Image: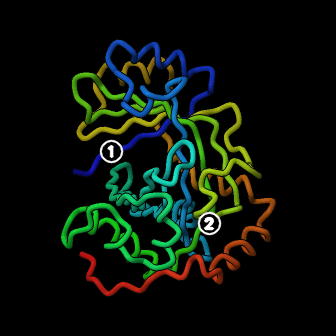
Amino acid sequence: MPRIEYKYSIHNGMIQDLIREISPRVKHDYYSEIRPGKKYTVRSIYLDTSALDFYQEKLSGIKRRKKVRVRGYNEASDDGTIFLEVKRKNGPTIKKSRAAVKFKNLGNLMSEGDIKKYVFSTKSGSQQYRSANYFFYYIQKLSLIPAIKVMYEREAFFYKFDERLRITFDSNLRSSLNVSFKNLHDEENLTYAMPGKAILEIKFETEIPLWMQNILTRYNLGSQALSKYTNCLETHSKFERQLQRSLHGLAKYNEFKYYHRNERIE
């Protein structure tokens, strides 16, 4: 079922205050609970066209947009799970599909495109198979190539009485134009975005509960059209020529010779 997502730009100093406010009604999600400091690292490679059409659509305020990305978490591990994701947006409404692959198989999957060989649970017609097929369909249709690697730390919570409400705090947003599926977890040559600030995200299906609305009002927080991809890409604007060279170079590199698929996408 599609969900609604609201984002808020907050100062780092507000994070603990807001967590104290929500703590009587929420609990950490599993992935925060098991990590030191209750935070885990999100690592994504965003794909775009050579003309950065996804970026331009965001700047133009187009409501119906999509993001295509490869997402992993925390430290590198050959058997760690990596997700192929397509996130579709219509204003604040989002719908996300994802398919899982082991990190050690990611490079082979991207060069061969063999979904059945490398993606988890890919019986024809399964959700994993459909999600992987969506991912490769958009890569082929739009000639997508890796544009930027984005990383941040996330502390995540669920509402105790309805886990359809999810609240996350994303901080330490950073990125690199040195993009390869092999270096997803590398922390070198990073540029930081939104210094001193974090992003509060609230995801829900029907409406934000009144207690959360009251907290947002007390802190004078209004939702904003924030994009980590856009914010990070713009921190590299002074390297615009380098960015364009990087994109065109990646398009020719054999790591990104995507497998042609003929399956019909609904």
User: Of discs 1 and 2, which sits in the foreground?
Assistant: 2
- Alpha carbon distance from label 1 to label 2: 26 Å
Provide the residue designation for mark 2.
147
- Please tell me the numbered disc located at residue 151: none
**Quadrant of the frame with the C terminus:** bottom left
Around disc 1, counting alpha carbons within 10 Å, would you say few (fewer than 14), some (14 to 19), or many (20 or more)? some
Q: Is residue 31 left or right of residue 37?
A: left
Amino acid type of the residue that numbered disc 1 sits on in the rendered structure = Ile
Is residue 32 something that shows in the picture? yes
Q: Residue at x 57, y 73 (%)?
A: 145
Q: Is residue 64 above or below residue 20?
A: below
In the image, residue 222 sits, relative to residue 190, either above or below, namely above
To which quarter of the image does residue 44 belong? bottom right
* Residue for point 75% across, 59% down: 237
Callout 2: SS:
strand
* 194 and 41: which is toward the camera: 41
Q: Are dots 1 and 2 in contact, CB under 8 Å?
A: no
The reply, left or right, for residue 67 in relation to residue 9 is left
Where disc 1 sits, the SS reads: strand
Q: How many marks?
A: 2
Q: Where is residue 68 shown, x and y percent of the image? A: 46, 64
Image location of residue 52, percent across then percent down: 60, 70
Q: Is residue 135 above or below residue 254?
A: above
Which residue is painted at 44% across and 28% down in the image?
34
Considering depth in this image, is 74 or 90 the residue closer to the camera?
74
**Where in the figure is residue 177, as x and y percent of width and height?**
70, 61
Q: Amino acid at mark 2?
A: Ala
Residue identifier under label 1: 4
144 relative to 16, above or below: below
Q: Earlier in the sequence, mark 1 or mark 2?
A: 1
Q: Position of residue 223 (x, y in %)?
A: 46, 37
